[in-house]
Amino acid sequence: MTRPIVGIIGNHHLINDQYPAHAGGSMNSEAVAEVSGAMPLLIPADPRFVSVDELMEACDGFLFTGGRPNVHPEEYGEAATEAHGAFDRARDSVALPLIRACVEQGQPFLGICRGFQEVNVAMGGTLYPEIRDLPGRMNHRMPPDGTLEEKFALRHKVSFTPGGVFARLMGADEVLTNTLHGQGIKRPGKRVVVDGTAPDGTPEAIYIDGAPGFTLSVQWHPEWRAATDPVSRPLFQAFGQAVAAWAAERAPAPVRKIA
């Protein structure tokens, strides 16, 4: 039986600071394949190579991943500053219209970290360039040193709306997550529902109100040990079920043999 296909939105990357490449973390593919039960397909996020219509035809769902480059602030009406960091305008040009099209059509997607921020911007929201510079906010950035285990360690709680979408999915109103981001939601976009927050009030879990499909997105990185983490696993499982349902809905009817 053919698995549904999840397009993983990649990032522009330089190998040895010289050779251009499209990159995606292997843990994203592992989570999609092992927990969501879908076939991961890395997407070169550049409008020179792909279009929204082609992607939606080729894939059953999408994973909008994290990445070092940030969404360019011009996408939400602000000027770029040094605090905004590096950018990937090609990914902006693919991801933002793709998110809006998926919301409209009901095609499932899962947003992670930068992907979470992309969803907010795509729906008309804005971002803070640096959360740790805000009064009363904690440092949500990845520790600069240490092993991967130390960098992806669980570091703060996320509180969900009691009885809300995430609380029902997780079976709990509060969970423990990792945190590896610098930017965060400033103003939620139209129809963006903040369903989970960190202890300092930073939005951590969102979905799109009234969307016909799966639109859950999180600010943390659930792809880390997704198969065993009690918070990550139900998220990727639910995403996989939504993608499978979409694939089944649009699958052509089998040809009946005429005796």
Image: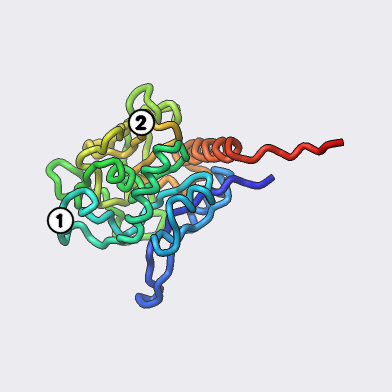
Q: CA distance from mark 2 to mark 1?
A: 36 Å
What residue did someone put label 2 on?
Answer: 174
Looking at the rendering, which quadrant does residue 126 occupy? top left
Q: Which amino acid is tagged 1?
A: Ala
Residue 190 in the image, given as x and y percentages of width and height: 27, 35
Q: Nearer the viewer, residue 257 or 3?
A: 257
Q: Which amino acid is tagged 2?
A: Glu
**Residue 90 appears in the figure:** yes
**Residue 194 appears in the figure:** no
Q: Nearer the viewer, residue 13 or 96?
A: 96
Q: Residue at left 24%, top 37%?
A: 188
Q: Secondary structure at mark 2?
A: strand
Q: Residues within 10 Å of mark 2 (few under 14, many from 20)?
A: some
* Residue furthest right in the image: 259
Is residue 1 rendered to the left or right of residue 82? right
Task: Identify the image quadrant of the N terminus.
Answer: top right
